[in-house]
Image (cartoon, rainbow, N blue to C red):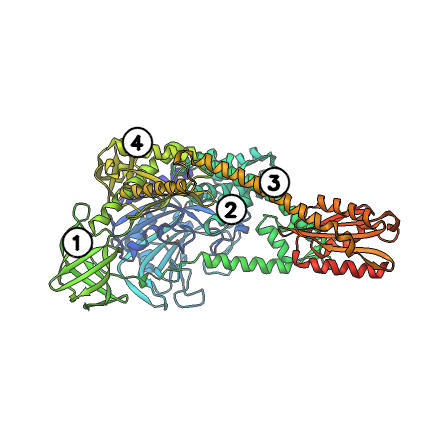
Amino acid sequence: MKTTAEIRKSFLDFFHSKGHQIVDSSSLVPENDPTLLFTNAGMNQFKDVFLGMDKRPYSRATTAQRCVRAGGKHNDLENVGYTARHHTFFEMLGNFSFGDYFKRDAIHFGWEFLTSPQWLGLPKEKLWVTVYHTDDEAYDIWHNQVGVPAERIIRIGDNKGAAYASDNFWQMGDTGPCGPCTEIFYDHGDHIWGGPPGSPEEDGDRYIEIWNIVFMQFNRQADGTLEKLPRPSVDTGMGLERISAVMQHVNSNYEIDIFQQLIAKVAELTGQTDLTDKSLRVIADHIRSCAYLIADGVIPSNEGRGYVLRRIIRRAVRHGHLLGAKETFFYKLVPTLIEVMAEAGKQVQEKQANVEKLLRLEEEQFARTLERGLALLDEALANVKDNVLSGDVAFKLYDTYGFPLDLTADVCRERNITIDEEGFEREMEAQRSRAQAASRFGVDYNNVIRVDGVTKFEGYTEVESLSKVTALFHDGKPVESIVAGQSAVVILENTPFYAESGGQIGDSGRLAGQGFTFDVKDTQKYGQVFGHIGELTQGSLSVGQSVNATVDAQRRHQTSLNHSATHLLHAALRQVLGTHVAQKGSLVSDAALRFDFAHPEAITKAQLFEVERIVNQQIRANNPIQTDLMELEAAKAKGAMALFGEKYAEQVRVLTMGEFSIELCGGIHAERTGDIGLFKILSETAIAAGVRRIEAVTGENAITWLHNQQTLLNHSAELLKSDVNSLAEKIQQLQDKAKKTEKELLALKEKAAMQAGADLAKSAVKIQDVSVLIHQIDGVETKSLRVMVDDLKNQLGSAIIVLVSVIDEKINLVVGVTTDLTAKVKAGELVALMAQQVGGKGGGRPDMAMAGGSQPENVNKALSVCSEWLHKNL
Ligand code: SER
């Protein structure tokens, strides 16, 4: 029996033997496509190739692509673990032709791989196929060339309610590459319920789609029309777990080798002995998506991709609790996962420490939200109306605190409270539609400037070239010529201008020629051509004209220093903080550099100094910065650092700085590390959970920064009449002095207030024969107010004294009642009544009570409430 790892390898070997290049799976975070949540099909990394906007050195490729479908329309998280084939993570085996072979070979390849005894050797009679209803060509190939009997070939029409909306018409999204497809089904046998595709029982588990072969022919436009692709292509996808289930003679994907081993491990870690428990499947599924997502740079958070990851982790952890896990367990599955994934496990293995750490932290954190969730539920239950807990509280518990509805219901039931399940469902539905919206492709690929051809880039060695205009765009539309004052994008045949990529900004400069000047403000890539963005300041310019293209060399030079420094910084961070430090983004301009990277905690000052010290040490080493072109595999073997999700050509540019840094990079760099001159970190901050950002400067900019700092220090020293070295000491002295003065001032103020208070006895009034003194005297602390009240009691003999004082937005209330009157008025009650008016609380003995308050704007109200009360009660 073939293992899943063997099937994966056979597939790639088979297509390799048919002239296909084996291409690595791309990252789960789709490159250059912020609208696609996760990579969800093998073709994602090739979409620009299908559209003719990107070219590869090969025209046939094969991949085993890791995919995640979670939180979107393709997969409801709730189902995973409870059905035979829902997963958050799966691998898609695929073969691709970019304008090379088409229907005939695609079908023959598929059939040979599935049925030849040399490969999978499946019985032919168990295979059924579907074709798009009008695709006679595919039908003919299946029937007349392959020999599939007519009763096992089913034509499927537009069964999804619109033209080209069909199970047999595959499209990437609302726009983009699409085409009719033919699907291969496997009949698991009549002991399982279900009917062939197209029949009313097609949703049963008997006939299972195993392979989808898409004939990519069109580019769907935003208005729904189909535009022919430059070259008809092929995109196929076969779910590895499904074909494994077929080959291993099991009906549920969860029974294949990979899942059985993972399930056994989950059972061991949680102490569960019933191996059919669905929670085991949930966890076995979830560790795959979670570990790979983290390995691909996703970090649990509250939004976007990070939020989907967080929900999956919490769902797994919650199921762990259902199984009786006593301690943090989820991350302990990682070693087993790496093992069962074999060849495909390397991706996680390289990041193992970080994957485990983030999973552990997230699980520990969830343990804390669990408690907070319970507290929230308690509070909500105390305020519940009509014995029904509202749907949004239940939803909030579910969504934010990870509480399953039934757990919430259990707690409610003990108090005879039910849940508004409809309200919960409504919130749930709203959440689902939000998730659906997030999972759709939203990019209109036709909206961008499209030019055939390739601009030759000469900027690695030149800052000036002679070239020719091949196209002009004004207001996003192609034009033949432009005149002075118009802004435009100029496409050149060859150029020394670097187009923005890899974090490095695009060059600026000038295009000039006979009677015209075009100021280039920025340079961008459109597919394979370079667009020079700017304004014609003089003359006119037409397609076909010769231009002298000159880069702003000074700006370029400063940018290159920052770019080289970024590589040194990356290597130094890995040395100081650990190899989990992975680049999450960068921006390299002439002014500064910015480097974002994954690191789960704050960086200490000492670590930062160390990083800065190492980078500057490397600068002083003045190593040559060497560029080599080599095969991707050779570069990887050399240990070159490559970025997550970056797409690299076969020949890659490898940048080496001594022994210290080796990285793949297409950017422009200094000649020697010494050119950088000086490296100074300006700031280090957190920009998202687990992602830090360092901003730094180099060369002249670093010197200027140091000068500015020096000037600032000198100026401060002058102001303090000190020298720079004793600045800290001097500031400390001044602070101490200021504190002392402040204290003295306060004491004086209080003394003055109390002196004024000594005369207060005169202001007492009579309410029903009782002496009452109500007075506001600001700036006095409670302690002193009490002394004043005692003093006034002595002076007045028999009285009720109420003093209020506001200090720094804070209110102090003191009430004193001489003992002969405490039967009528209790100081504690009166002060409590007043405190209520100013947002405070208080109380005390019947003869002396105190309170605080925080709403000075209500002091007058408190005073009048007090006086009214006394009038009423005396
Ligand atoms: N793109 C197609 C799919 O995802 C075939 O790979 O099914």
The three-letter amino acid code for the residue at tag 1 is Thr
**Dot 2 corresponds to which residue?**
310
Work out whether mark 4 precedes mark 3 in sequence or the reverse, and give the earlier one. 3
**Dot 3 corresponds to which residue?**
321
Quadrant containing the N terminus in the rendered view: top left
Residues under labels 4 and 2: Cα distance?
A: 40 Å
Residue 417: percent from left, percent from top: 72, 54
Residue situated in front as seen by the camera: 865 or 590: 865
Residue 105: percent from left, percent from top: 28, 52
Find residue 606 and report its image quarter.
top left
**Dot 4 corresponds to which residue?**
617
Residues under labels 3 and 2: Cα distance?
A: 16 Å
Q: State which mark lies toward you, 4 or 3.
A: 4
Residues under labels 1 and 2: Cα distance?
A: 50 Å
The three-letter amino acid code for the residue at tag 3 is His
Residue farthest to the left, as pictured:
514
